[in-house]
Amino acid sequence: MSKIQTLSEDIINKIAAGEVIERPASVVKELVENSLDANSTNITIEIKGAGQKLIRVSDNGDGMSPEDAKKSIIRHATSKIRTADDLYSIQSLGFRGEALASVSAVSKLTITTKEKSTVEGFMVEINGGFIKSSGPAALNSGTTIEVKDLFYNTPARKKFLKSDLIELKHIIDIITRYSLYNKSISFKLINESRTIINSPSTPNMRANIASIYTPSTAKDLIKISHEHHLEDKKGKGKSLADLNENKVAIVKEKEIKNIEELSDSDYKKKLIKVYGYTSKPQDCRNDRTQQSIFVNGRWVKNDNINQAIYDAYHSLLFHGKHPIYVIKIDLDPESIDVNVHPNKTQIKIEQKHLVYEIVYKAVYESLEKNKLIPIMNIKTDQQFSFKTNEKEKLNWQEDLKIEEVEKRIISNKEESKYLFEKSNQALLRSKETNEKEISDQIVKYNHSNNIPKVGENRDSKYLISKGMNEKVNSKYEESNTTDIKKVLTSQKGKELNFFKGTEKLPPMRLLGQINKTFFIAETVGGMLIIDQHVVQERVLYEKFMSEYINRKVAVQSLLEKELLNFTTSEAQLILANLDRIRQFGFTLEHFGENDFLLSTIPTLFGRTQGKNLLYIIINEISEGGVKEFERVQEEIITRMACRASVKAGDELSVVEMKRLLNELAECKLPYTCPHGRTIFIKITADELEKKFLRK
Ligand code: ADP
Ligand code: MG
């Protein structure tokens, strides 16, 4: 007798349910996706017992005819695709026709539904996959699906469920994602009769994010909006190399027709859109919970896209910090495969590397465009104390000789400007700075798109920049410009402690150093505190990175080769990595046993740091292993830059600081160190005035 038997429909459905319906949240996901596919604008989800007792999803969508309502629970019954070809260009969220079949196999299910065109609704009740009763029902247009006693007939599955709290968290997660994506659809999640998510239809994505996360989270997010067409106007494929010079172009250019030959839908097909919001580096979180990627409206988990986003943050992100993001990608449905897993949260992207590059560029550009200088919020309610301890008092007294103090008071009227950093001032006075150039620069800066604007949004923690300050008062801006011009040029332009400002950095007048660590400067709309170490770190990092990437590390030969002795394991490691080490500017020759001769060092870091930096390289390679070299390269450069930078505690003159700022101005991302530490903090004049109760 044959041992093989075809399984009964009931068992097949239970097996399928095992894949599709892992937990209550999976049911919520499938039902909500169905409501979305049915063009609903209002979706309410009610939960009891973390979804095990009851899940009820009601929508105001298209509804079903009585016949369709009965068919809907048949496995592989769907209204969404018809032919195999349809499978390759899926526009709807559902298509497998197995969700309702699976849910009905493991629960007690009731479908109540009414199409707009009919007068009466219809109800069908299914228990463990079999229709128990059906008949007319009263209902507004739309569908309500009620799932009771989930997994009542599959005790094994029930056992695997986590605590109610965790299961509820998964449900909240699903609703959060879908309401994030669908700004004009109103979602309500009611748990045990209490509304826990209420996301009304909102006019824009930021308002929508505000209703789901908090208004303050939404307010500080950076907008992303980027389109990439696979063919440019000249009919040539866009060079991927120009997406980012630091990235290797991975994708070959496609063979492309002339753009005029393309029809509208052809054109759209070749368009890849990336849009959404992401957080500033300083607002990143310790966890990844507030990250969502949507591809063609579907919430997906995709390592490739996620990696592109993280890579765009690159050195702006502190280790262990995670950005908040809502990233939406629209692309040709034919270029992705959503039929990878029954739960449909995984997709396969045909041009994976291209999508990586485009997402990378979209996020990178937005980060770069936005000024990332945090503004310090001086709390007015915070009591400030001038009490100093005895030791501090002594220091002050020692430092300030009586004559100095006298001189300061006497010369206050005409010479106050030279009191700080007097010696430097004397040196600098001889040179002239072009006054017109300075005022031109200020005007230009104030009118450039990226101007950090002051005077609005007082309670905001960070500098508000382009895109978020449309409502800025332009009158304020103008009068502010005039004032600042007066202040910054008041000394007949003779001050060389004046940093002219560039597209990226504001003009400022360097006032001096605090604690041999921070520089203080006056700038448009307030004052800046600058971390000198971090400035240099960023400068060295970018300079060296560019040398390294271009394989043009400038080296300095040592007049006398230096003999270095290593441990056996280090020596082995060095021998295996001589070339890699040379790429960083260190030339080593094996000199028998564990000894090596060092003959060159990278010029940029100078003689004194030379050897220390070599140890950093050896250390990183040994920790990461040769296989990991790709990944540790950047960490090596980051650490080299840090090690070689001026330290807190180094005395710097205004001139040296200005030179550093000029170099910083050349940097691509002059606002944080390679590890993400802030370079500038701004205290606005506005805050100071409030602090001194002038406002
Ligand atoms: P799929 O979504 O893959 O088509 P499902 O089992 O989830 O499969 O649903 C089966 C069918 O039932 C759908 O194709 C759709 O026609 C219908 N349906 C399910 N839920 C709804 C709803 N909320 N509103 C209207 N039609 C629905
Ligand atoms: Mg479905």
Image (cartoon, helix red, strand yellow):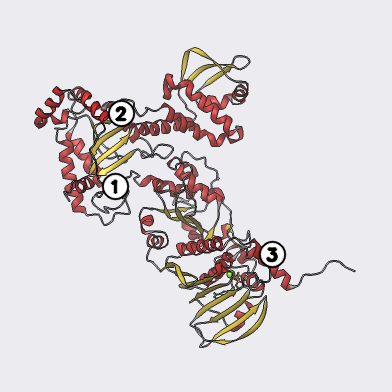
In the picture, measured across the screen, residue 55 lies left or right of residue 461, that is right
Label 3: which secondary element: helix
**x then y, percent, for residue 174:** 52, 63
Compare marks 1 and 2 and give the one earlier in the sequence: 1
Q: Are marks 3 and 2 in contact (CB under 8 Å)?
A: no
Residue in the image at 51% along x and 72% along y: 46
Please tell me the numbered disc located at residue 377. 1
Answer whether residue 602 is visible to the viewer in this image. no
Q: Amino acid at mark 2?
A: Lys
User: Which residue is labeled 2 in the image?
Assistant: 516
In the picture, measured across the screen, residue 404 lies left or right of residue 140, that is left
Image-quadrant location for residue 442: top left
**x then y, percent, for residue 636:** 50, 31
User: Which residue is labeled 3 in the image?
Assistant: 156
Compare marks 1 and 3 and give the one earlier in the sequence: 3
Residue in the image at 33% along x and 54% along y: 467
